Amino acid sequence: MKSPDILREVAENLKLTIERLQKVKVLGEKKKKRAINLLNEASENFLILSGEVERDNIEMAEFLRKKSVEIKNNTSDRAIERIGEKEYLKSIEKMNLYSKTAFYDFKPTKLKELKRAYRAFIYGMALYFVLAGLSTRPELAITALILAIPAILSMLSLQRRGYTGLMLAYAVSPIPIIQSAMLVRMFYSVVTNPEMIKKAAEVLGKSESFIVAYSWGVILLSFIDFALLTYGIYSLTKHRHAFL
C-alpha cells in the first residue's frame, strides 16, 4: 500500500512546518503557540494513522500531502503577510481537523461504527414520529411536525458526514428523548389503573383488553425509541471528529 508512506510524509511535512513557524515573527506568541500545538497534534495523528491504514486511499492521501506542502510553503513572514494571518491560521485548523477525520477514510472499521451510530439516530427519529401519532395527544404530533424538517436535514447532512448535520442532531434529539420517557410514564399510569383503562375504553369505543395491549405496545416502542436515540447521540458524539 502507498497510503502509509504518503501519510508519514504528511506528518514529516507538518514537523518541518513547526520548525519554520518557530522562526516566524509576524504572528503573536499566543497565536504561534496555538498553531504549533495544532500542527503537533496533526502530525502525531497522521503518524499513528500511517501504522493503522486498512484501506489504501491514495487519492485522499495525495490530497493531504498537497495540503501539508501548501502549509509548509506558506510558513514564512512574507507568505503569511501575503495570504493573511487569518487564512493561514484557518489552514492549520483545517489540517488538524483533517488529521482526525482521516481515520474514517482509511479505516473501514471506524466508518462501520459511525454508520451504526447514524442508523440508530435515524431509526430513533423515525420511531419518534410513529409514537407522536400513537400518543393520542395532539401537542406531541404538532411538536413532531415542527421537528420534521430539521430532522430530515440532519439525516441528509449526517450521511455526507457534514458537521451541520451533527449540530442539527443535537438540536432535535432532546425533545424526542424526553417525550419517549413521558410516554412510558403516561401509558404506564393507564395500564396500572383499572379506572383509567375503563374510561379510555369508553372514550375510544374500544375494549379494555385493546387499551391494555395498545398501552403496553406504546410503552415498549417508547423504551426502544429512548434507547436508540440516546445510543445514537452518544455514538455520534464519540465519532464527532468524523464530521467536516
Image (cartoon, rainbow, N blue to C red):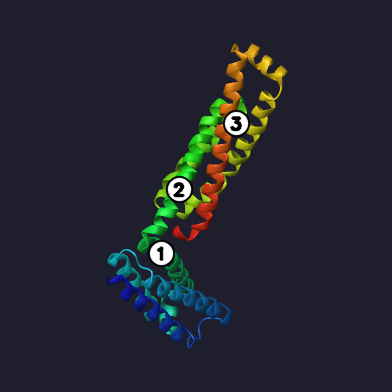
Q: Is mark 3 on a helix, strand or loop?
A: helix
What residue do we see at 47% from left, 49% from top? 117
For label 1, count other residues whose C-alpha is less than 10 Å away and answer few (under 14), some (14-19) or many (20+).
many
Q: Residue 85 carries which label?
A: none
| Residue 131 left/right relative to 119 | right
The residue identified by callout 3 is 219
Query: Of residues 22 and 127, which is closer to you in this image?
Result: 127
Q: Which of marks 1 and 2 is nearer the N terminus?
A: 1
Q: Is mark 2 on a helix, strand or loop?
A: helix
> Image quadrant of residue 42?
bottom left
**Which numbered disc, 3 or 1, marks the residue closer to the eye?**
3
Mark 3, Cα crowd under 10 Å, few <14 / some 14-19 / many 20+, is many
Residue position for label 2: 118
Q: Measuring 31% from the left and 63% from the top, which residue is drawn there? A: 55
Q: In which quarter of the image is residue 84?
A: bottom left
Residue visible at 36% across and 58% down in the picture = 108
| Residue 92 x/y as whole percent | 45, 72
Residue 53: image location, x then y, percent: 35, 67
Disc 2 residue type (three-letter): Tyr
Q: Do the residues labelled 3 and 1 touch (CB within 8 Å)?
A: no
- Reading the image, the residue beneath label 1 is 103
Task: Say which amino acid is labelled 1.
Answer: Phe
> Upstream in the sequence, badge 2 or badge 3?
2
Mark 3–mark 1 Cα distance, whole angstroms, equals 39 Å
Image coordinates for residue 114, horizontal then vertical, percent? 44, 53
Sooner in the amino-acid sequence: mark 3 or mark 1: 1
Outermost bottom residue: 23
Amino acid type of the residue that numbered disc 3 sits on in the rendered structure: Ile
